[in-house]
Image (spheres, grey):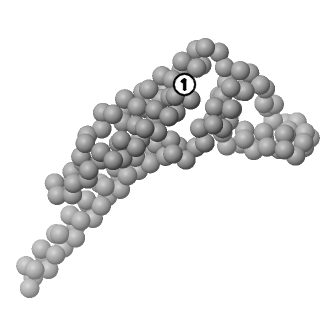
Amino acid sequence: MKELDHCRLKIMERLRETMKDANDWKEEVEENSYLWLDDRKEHMRQFLLYGRSLEGKTIFLFDIKFQYSIESELENHEQIKETPPNLSQFQNQIDLFQSIYNDIDNWDQTFIFNSWLRVDARPIKRQLLILVTKWIDL
């Protein structure tokens, strides 16, 4: 009976290790979640107006200023200036997404965790590459 308990504990430990490794890989994939969560058209609109994508607090300030016209709340904050991008900023954006594309393209076709759990990464890889291409083609 002790031997059976020992085997069960060993199996459970290997399962926990495998789940941790698989979750680590999932988090790595989720680092690219902006590719499917962010609005490409809005990103492009902001880039064309400001030469960058507005994020976090900047968007909040932008909303206050232009949607609600509460200029007094913006006195102590940096004003958002329209500065269209130059050619090098366009090239930097293209290079950034091309680099992301190359990184994803270099992923393995399958991942094996703890020598027994095999994940076929081809569908995820294919969809991410399609999404990156859509970002590049903006």
Instruction: Tell me: 3 left or right of 82.
Output: left
Q: Position of residue 109 (x, y in %)?
A: 25, 42
Q: Does residue 107 show up?
A: yes
Instruction: Tell me: 45 left or right of 90.
Output: right
**Quick check: 63 above or below 106?**
below
Q: Position of residue 97 (x, y in %)?
A: 48, 29
In the image, what residue occupies the spot 60% across and 19% down? 89
- Quarter occupied by residue 55: top right
Q: Which residue is mark 1?
A: 93
Exactly how many numbered labels are in the figure?
Answer: 1
Q: Position of residue 78 (x, y in %)?
A: 79, 31
- Quarter occupied by residue 3: bottom left
In the image, what residue occupies the spot 52% across and 33% down? 135
- SS of the residue under disc 1: helix
Quadrant assignment for the N terminus: bottom left
In the image, what residue occupies the spot 77% across and 25% down? 82
**Quick check: 86 above or below 34?**
above
Give 44 or 21, whichever is nearer the viewer: 44
Which amino acid is tagged 1?
Gln
Give 93 or 27, whichever is nearer the viewer: 93
Quadrant assignment for the C terminus: top right
Q: Position of residue 48 (x, y in %)?
A: 68, 26
